[in-house]
Image (cartoon, rainbow, N blue to C red):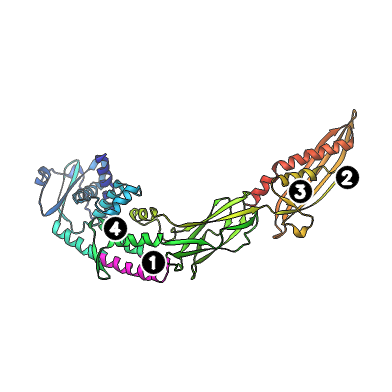
Amino acid sequence: MKFLFNSLCIGIVIFSIHCCGSSSTPSATPQNIIEKPKPQWLVDYPVDPNYYTGIGSASKNQYGTEAQKSAQDLALADMASQITVTVTSDIITTLIEKGAITEDEYMATARSQAVADLEGHELMDSYQDQNYFYVYYRLSKAQYAAVQARKRQVALNLSTDFYKKAQEAIALSNFSESFSAAIQAFIPLIPYLNEALATEIDGKSVILSNEINQFIQVLLTDITLSPNQPSAAAKLGKPVIEKLSMQAQSSNGMAIRNLPLRVNFKKGAGELVESINTGGRGFAQLQITSITSGEKLQILETTIDLSGLINDSHDPILKGIIETIPLPSARIILDVTNPTIYLESSEVFDGETLTQLQVEPRLKNLFIENGFHFVKSPDQADWQMTLRASANKGTEFSGMFTAFADVSLSLVDRTTGDEIYKDSISREKGIDLSYANAANKALNNASEKLNASILPEIMKSLK
C-alpha cells in the first residue's frame, strides 16, 4: 500500500511539472553517443545537509525523444519527495475522521503543492548512455525556506484582508458577499494548514486558518429558515395560489439578505422555481407553477444553496469543510386535491339519443374512485370534459347482430384553455341477439379501452 501511495504521489508530481513545462535540449541518438564513465553522482547518491537533491532517469526505448524531459521530471519529483509532509492540522484530522477526504488524498494534494514550490532549483549535471538519460538537480534548503517564508506572509496578508471583508459584510447581513469573502480568505492558507500560521486580528493573536474555518461554520449554522405558514392547499395540475415565502434570520433575529436557497419536492412532484434568494428583509418568495403528482400529501423543502458560491475548481479540502456542515432547512406541507370537472356528454345509437347511458357512468366512476369531483356548472369547474359516443348498426348473420361504436374524449383546462387530454376509439365491435344489445356491448368495449389508459395519460400530460 505504501509503495502504491508513493507511486501515486510521484505520478501527480510528474504531471504537475510536465504541465508547468521545462527546458530541454535535443537528445543525441544512440548511434552518435560515445559513452563516458558514469559521473560520481550516479555511483554514489549525493547527500548534502544544505540541499534537497533529485536524480532522475528515463529509458530512451520507452520515452524516445522525450527521455530527457522525463528524466528532468523524475529528478524534480525525487527532490519534492524529500520535503516532509505530515498530517497535524486539526482541520485536516477532523475532515479525515468524518470521511470528507482521505489521508491519501490530502498527501497527494500536499505533494503536488510541494512541486509548485520548487522554484530556484539548479541543474547540476546530466548524463546519457546508449539506453538512458540521467539528470541531477539540487535546491538550497535555505533558499527554499526563504521563498516559503515570503509566500506565507503573502498568504497571511491576503487572507486577513478577505477575512475582514467577510466580517464587514455579515455585519450588514449580506450573506453572499460575506461567504464569498470567507472562501477567498481560506484558499491562500490551504498549503499551510499544517503550519498553523498566526496573525493578529482585533488585537488578538489567532491561528488564521482555524479562525476562518470557525467563521464559516458559524456563518452557516447560525441561520434559521422559517416559512410564513406550515401548510398550504394545492390542486393537481394547478399553480399554488397561496403566497408562500421563506424567511432567513440569524440567531439574534437579524434578517439575512442575499441568501441563496434551493426549493425542491421532498415528497410529491411539481414545477417550481428551484433557485431563489432572500431580499432586503430576509424573505424569499416560493413559486410553484404546477402540481404534477397525484399524491394527497406533498412536502416542499427549502435549504441553503451553496452551489452558486462554491464552484468545482475549489480545493477538495475546502469542499470537504463545507460538505460536513449541517445546513438548515425548512418544510411546507401541501394538501393536494384534484381539480373539479364539468362533464358534457352525448351518447346516441343509430341517430337516437340513448336513455340508458353506457360510457358516461363508467367514466365518472373511474374519476370519482380516484378522488375527482364532478360539478353541475362549468363556472364551478377547473376542467371541462367533453364526451361523444355513438353506435351504428352493422350486419346480421344467423340471428346474431353486429354494431360498431365510436367514442371520443377531450379534457380542457378552463383556466388556461389548454387541452390536457384527447383520445378516441373507432369501430369498436359488439355482437348480440339484437342491434340494441350489440350497440351496448360495442359502447362498453370502447369505454373499457378508453378507461384503461386515460388517467395515466392525463398525469403524464401534467408533467
**Chain-order first, disc 3 or disc 1:** 1
**Chain-order first, disc 1 or disc 4:** 1
Label 4 – label 3 distance at C-alpha: 66 Å
Residue at numbered disc 2:
355
**Chain-order first, disc 4 or disc 3:** 4
Q: Which label is found at residue 178?
A: 1
Residue at numbered disc 4:
190
Label 3 – label 1 distance at C-alpha: 58 Å
Q: Is 359 placed left or right of 292 in the picture? A: right
Label 1 – label 2 distance at C-alpha: 74 Å
**Chain-order first, disc 1 or disc 2:** 1
Q: Which label is found at residue 409?
A: 3
Could you say where residue 94 lies in the image, as x and y percent from the top left? 31, 51
From this viewpoint, is residue 215 visible?
Answer: yes
Eye-nearest disc, 2 or 3 = 2
**Chain-order first, disc 4 or disc 2:** 4
